Image (cartoon, helix red, strand yellow):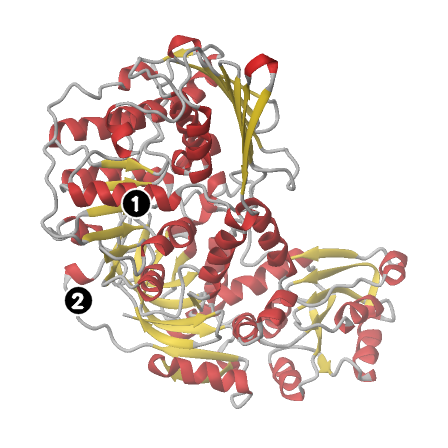
Amino acid sequence: MKQVVQNYKSGELALLDVPVPRSKPGGVLVRSAYSLISTGTELMKVSEAGMSMLGKARSRPDQVAKVMQSVATNGVPATYRKVMGKLDSYTPLGYSLCGVVEQVGDGIDDVKVGDLVACAGNEHALHAELNWVPKNLYARVPDGLAPRHAAFGTVGSIAMQGVRRGEPQLGEVALVIGLGLIGQLVVQLLNASGVRVVGVDPDPARCELAERLGAATCGDPASAAVENAVAELTEGHGVDQVYLAAGGDSNQPVELAARLSRDRGRVVDIGKCRLDLPWNAYYEKELDVRFSRSYGPGRYDPAYELEGRDYPIGYVRWTERRNLACFLDLLARGRVDVEPLVSHTADFGDAVETYQRLKDGELKAVAVLFKYPEAEEEQAAGETGEAEAPAVSVAVPAAVSAVRRVGTGSTPARSAKASASVRLAFAGAGNYATSMLLPHLAQRDGVELSTVVTTTALSAANAQRKFGFAKATTDLDAVLDDPSIDAVFVVTRHSSHAELTRRALLAGKAVFVEKPLALTEDELTGVLTTVEESGNDRLQVGFNRRFAPLLQEAGKRFGVRSGPASVRYLVNAGRLDHGSWYLQQDSQGSRFAGEGGHFIDTASWLLDADPVSVYALTTPGNEDLQVVLGYPGGSTATISYVTTGPAGFPKETLDLVADGRALRLDDFVRASVYADGGAGGRKRWISSRLPKARDKGQRAQLDAFLDAVRTGGPMPVPLESLAATTAATLAVRTSLVGGVPVTLAVARTGTGTGTGTGAEAEAR
């Protein structure tokens, strides 16, 4: 199918061929009839993309700060790959459309195939021929309402939420600054609410249009006519509300708002304009400044938008979806008229030309619609569809030892590949995959990137373009059924790891799954049972730190120990950004469940043994954890996982002490080994590397995995160790809930520190 995209690095606009999505539970697949260009928001994004790198940085100082923090934490190369990966990717455009329901996912009973719906969301109502839309981001179009008018539903909801924030009352007077698309809708909504409106815009044509649509009077912001109209309508008191629907860098709108507001008036910011509030003016009138957040309550809440959890109407009267339905109702009853706002209707095939004309100023418009061709026959199932993230239940853990079932089944058969080339498929192409894994695999001798599967069509197309995948799709079954694919990388969100790993193992593939392997004991048991029943143990979990060159060298320098050891691992995890999917603990597990396996695996590698007990404590009111692991022979490891540390402090520091020797690793940049020398002297080894060369072992881990797939040899880490690390990670939650240590089964013991036993020693 076709989709409008833009490359934020180069500014290129394109009508791109992308895989067709398939309907998923909790939403509907919609074939677009009309989609609306937001001539404010979208053109601002298009303009930013055309700036130089310096201009982009100046326009987004918040993102520059994040980049600098990433440099301090991850080093220059990793940060550069991540930033350039984001910039040099196609991003979608659009967020407001109307279309016909083509497929209905499980759990949806309020619409049926063939219904006309209005859709919202900058990830779900895109300028594309087909979109998958979750339940709370669509509303059924009332009978008789034209699809081209229903396509205004999202921008209408934005205007409506802004008006609600102003709390207008009958007989009041409002000032609307900025008479673009949103401003024109605000004018009509206020007029329908019994509020008299004065409009402000430097464009005479927009002022004339607003007056035709119900404004009492409109004029240029510098015109005395505006102030005279306000004085006449309010008897000199000033307007009750001001709605800032303008954009740009001028501070004139907020200054005008203060001048024309009454005492204790309300100022509502809907657009994105400069807000240097003149203190005296706002203080003396005690003005109430409010922000309006997009379509309404529910926006940016994944539980509402993606999981379909509605807010009770008794507590939240107007949500995103209710605003959308309300606006459609006003359109259907003729209380709002959007037809006069439509300056141009373009065929969807002319999308790139239309954007260019808007950007160049050749096409001056308040609103522009894309009209889509009639539905064409669906492509073959093998070329379309979306890889569904399986629904995985998160159960309360039972005794962790119950899942330790490895080693009871038959030994899986291993066979070397006839060809030296390894064909890989990726399920998922998010930030980690595209910055830490795929750059090491693209253009690599002996590796063929066969197929990339993602849940969004555009991310698959981006990965195909950037890394050279032969195919891009949203259909996981097509990958698993392809006998030519040797290994599948599972790099999706945490909740899908265990089920996707099971499916890939059952399909006979070698599997590289990013941590965590499982979020519950039942999931872990399911993976291990699949290994036993299928005879396929070709599994590696992305515990890369044990492969870090600096840690490997330090382990060799430390040497083999004879007595018990103590490990102390401080992880300065930091706080997550608001909106991060890591915060979706109900569905994705806790932060420690997601990444704690990294640190447990590293300690177990150093001690060459699996933990036999886990005891965890948490700091009240935050996510700071102290995890104490017991190992055979009396060794212990303490992991301090903190989120409240300073951003400038190293993310990971590690100490190992045993037999009169000590190993110290500072954030994979510096390592030291101390040991007693003869006659009480001391000898010391120190190795360091520049922060830009920080290497946490991703490349070495991939080398070991590919070699195992190519030769049919043992996996880099024994399955017993992967299961033990996962079981210990799950036991942290069990210990926190019960307040007592959790005992684990013993899997293996060793002499410690970089020597390894069995298959692990062979892999290293």
Which residue in the structure is indicated by mark 2? 379
Which residue in the structure is indicated by mark 1? 703
Q: Is residue 616 left or right of residue 264?
A: left
Disc sitting over residue 208 in the figure = none
Q: Quadrant of residue 461?
A: bottom left
Residue 292: where, in percent of width, then height? 63, 57
Q: Quadrant of residue 642?
A: top right
Foreground pick, 245 / 661: 661
Q: Secondary structure at mark 2?
A: loop
Residue 395: where, in percent of width, then height? 34, 25
**Residue type pointed to by label 1:** Asp
Foreground pick, 531 / 194: 531
Q: Quadrant of the C terminus?
A: top left
The Cα atoms of the two marked residues, 2 and 1, are separated by 38 Å
Is disc 2 in contact with disc 1, using a CB cutoff of under 8 Å? no
Q: Secondary structure at mark 1?
A: helix
In the image, is residue 157 above or below residue 596? Answer: below
Asked if one can make out residue 312 in the rendered structure from this viewpoint, the answer is yes
